[in-house]
Amino acid sequence: MNKRILLAKRPEGLPGEDTWTYEEVEIPEVQDGEFLVQHHYISLDPAMRGWLRDQRSYIAPVAVGDVMRAASVGKIVESKHSLFPEGSYVAGWGGVQQYCVTDGAGWYTVDPALAPLETYIGTLGMPGMTAYFGLLEVGKAKVGDTVLVSGAAGAVGSVVGQIAKIHGCRTVGIAGGPEKCKYLVDELGFDGAIDYKNENIREGIKTHCPKGVDVYFDNVGGEILNTALTRINRGARVVICGAISQYNSTEPVKGPSNYMSLLVNSASMIGFVVMNYRHRYKEAALTMGQWLAEGKLKSREDVYNGIDNFHNTFLRLFSGAKLGKLVLNVLEAEDLS
Amino acid sequence: MNKRILLAKRPEGLPGEDTWTYEEVEIPEVQDGEFLVQHHYISLDPAMRGWLRDQRSYIAPVAVGDVMRAASVGKIVESKHSLFPEGSYVAGWGGVQQYCVTDGAGWYTVDPALAPLETYIGTLGMPGMTAYFGLLEVGKAKVGDTVLVSGAAGAVGSVVGQIAKIHGCRTVGIAGGPEKCKYLVDELGFDGAIDYKNENIREGIKTHCPKGVDVYFDNVGGEILNTALTRINRGARVVICGAISQYNSTEPVKGPSNYMSLLVNSASMIGFVVMNYRHRYKEAALTMGQWLAEGKLKSREDVYNGIDNFHNTFLRLFSGAKLGKLVLNVLEAEDLS
C-alpha cells in the first residue's frame, strides 16, 4: 500500500491541516517502460508554498486533488525500464507519497556510496543547484566581494555562504537565533552572522560588512531585504531567490521601499529559478560533490520521520524550527534498515 | 549683475517658494584660465529634487546656501581660457543663475547651427543620454521587443520611445492626459499610449502590449511600476531611471510589492545613472544628432521665460503641466535677440 498526501484545498495564510488529504491506496502495477520507486526521503522546500497558489508562475500550481509535488529520492524496487534497473537509487519529482511509478522522465540515478541519500535532494539536489547558480551565475560573486545571505542556515543559504567562502568572498549570514548564528560561523566558516531575532539588522550589516555588500542573496524578503538595500555597493547584485517572510501573509506583499538604492548605486535586483540552469546541473553536482568529498562543503540535513508527520514538518519551514535542509523520511518502520 | 537662486533650506514634500533665495550679485572678475558664460537656458529636471535631499547618493546634495545645481547652455561673453574663445556656445553645469564663471571643467562647446541651443540640454544633453544608454545599454532593447515607458511625454521618456521605434521595438508609452497620449502616437510614432489619469493602467498594458513587456523603462515608480511588473515577460529588464511619483512624498516610498514577478519571470530590475556612460556621451550625441537631422527623432522643449519664474516652472515637473523637455530661458528681456 502507498500512503500519499493530496492537496485538498488552497490555503489562505499559513496552511492548516485541512490543506491536505491523507490517503492510502494500492500501488499501481508497473507497465513496460516504467519502474516503481520506494521513497526514502521527501524534500520539503519553501517553494512548495508557492505551488499551492493558483497564479501564473514559472511552473503550474499543484491542482486540487493531485498528489502534492515534492522532490524525492529512493530505491527502485521493481522495474520494466531498461535504463533504470531494480535495486538502483534514483532522485526525481516523486511527490509526497511513499511509492511512485514513473516512466523515468526527470529522474536520474544517484550513488549512495558517494553521499548519503538525503544529500541528493539537498546540497546535491535543487537547493544546492539553486545556491550554486544563484550565487555564481546570477549574483556573479567574485574574489573579494562581500556576500550577504539571508535564510543563511537553510538548505540554500548555508550552501550559498560556503560557496562564497570557497570563492574568496567575505561571507555574512542572517539567521534566526544564536544557535543558527553560531553554526554559521563555527561550523560553516562564515565571517559573520546576524541574528535577526535578537539584533538590529542594519547595525549588524554595518558591523559585519564594513565595505558594504556586493552580492545580497535574498531568501526572505520583507524588512530584511529592505534593510539590506540600504547597504549595497555600486554595481551590487541583489539576487531574488525567495521571500519566505511573505509566503503565508494574508496582507499584500511588502515591496522593498528602498528599491531606489538600485538607481543610486547602479545596482541590479535579479530574479531567477533554478530550472534555467538545468542543462548545467551535472557540472554543478560534480563540482559540489568534489567539495563535499574534500570537506570544503558541509551538508546538513534535518530529518524527520513518517509521512504522517508531513504537515507539522512542513510548517517548520516557516517557523524556522530546523537547521539545514528539511527532509522527511517516509519509509515505514518495518522498512527502516 | 547676475541674478541667481540659492538653496535656502531643504524642503519637506513639494518644495515651497521658501526653498529658495533669490539674489542679485556682481559678476565676478574672470581670472586667467577662466571664462564667463551668459546662460541662455537652464535645464529643469526631476533629478534636481533628489539633489535637495541630504542623503548618500550618486552625487553630493546641493549645500544650503549654494547656487542650485542645474545643467545650462549659453554663450561665452568673456574668456581668458585658450580652449574656450569668446563668442562660442557651451553647455555645462552652470547652475540656476544668469551668468557663470568657470575654469571649463565639465563644459563643452556646442554648435547652434546644428541644433537649437536648448536641444543641447535636452535630447542632446543629459535627458537624451539617459534615454539612449538606459534603453540600449541597461535595458538591452532589441528588435521585436515590446518596450513600455512611463513618463513617456517627458524629456527622457519621449526619447526612449523614439529610440525604441528606431530599433524595431513595439513601443508603448504611459502619460497623463489625452493631449500627451495623442502627441506620443501622432507625433512621435508610438504604437500605443496609456493615459494613466483616465484609463486603467493594467488593462491598458494588456491591450497595447499583447505579447507582454520585455523592457519597462520606469521614470515614475509607485503604482505604475507595480502594475507594469505584473505584465513582464521571461527575462524582462525593468530599468529604474526615476520615481517622480515618490519624490515629494512625505510618506515612506512605496516599494513595488509585485517584485516577486522578477523571480517568477527570471527578470531584472536595474538601476543606473547616466554618468556611468560619460565616456560614451560623444558617441550618443553623434548618433542622436544624425537621427535629429534625418527627422527620425523629434525633440520638443517646453520653454518658460525669466529666472524669476524658476520656482513655478520647476513645479511643472511634478504637476505634469508641460510637454517634452522643461527649460527656462534666463536671458533678460533686453538680451533676447
Image (tube, coloured by chain):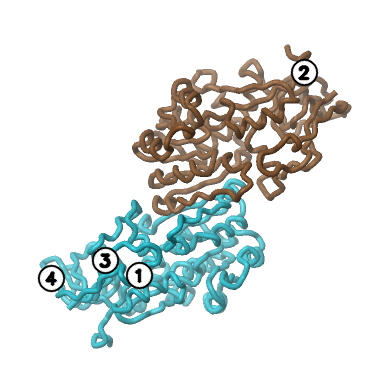
Chain colours: A cyan, B brown
Place of residue B249 in the rendered image (x, y in percent of width and height, measured from the top left): 61, 44
- Quadrant where the C terminus of chain B lies? top right
Eye-nearest disc, 2 or 1: 1
Callout 2–callout 1 Cβ contact below 8 Å:
no
- Measured in 3D between alpha carbons, the distance from the residue under mark 4 to the one under mark 2, in whole angstroms, is 92 Å
The residue identified by callout 3 is A8
The residue identified by callout 1 is A16
Eye-nearest disc, 2 or 3: 3
Place of residue A37 in the rendered image (x, y in percent of width and height, measured from the top left): 21, 73
Do marks 3 and 4 share a subunit?
Answer: yes
Label located before the other in sequence (4 or 1):
1
Do marks 3 and 1 share a subunit?
Answer: yes
The residue identified by callout 2 is B332
- Measured in 3D between alpha carbons, the distance from the residue under mark 4 to the one under mark 1, in whole angstroms, is 34 Å
Looking at the image, the residue that sits furthest to the top is B337
Residue B108 in sight from this viewpoint: no
Looking at the image, residue B169 lies above or below residue A1: above
Q: Residues within 10 Å of mark 1 (few under 14, many from 20)?
A: some
Secondary structure state at the residue bearing disc 3: loop
Residue nearest the viewer, comparing A105 with B257: B257
Residue B52: mark in rendering: none
Identify the residue at horizontal 36%, vertical 77% (top origin): A115
What amino acid is found at the position of numbered circle 4 in the picture? Val
Q: Is residue B115 left or right of residue B77?
A: left
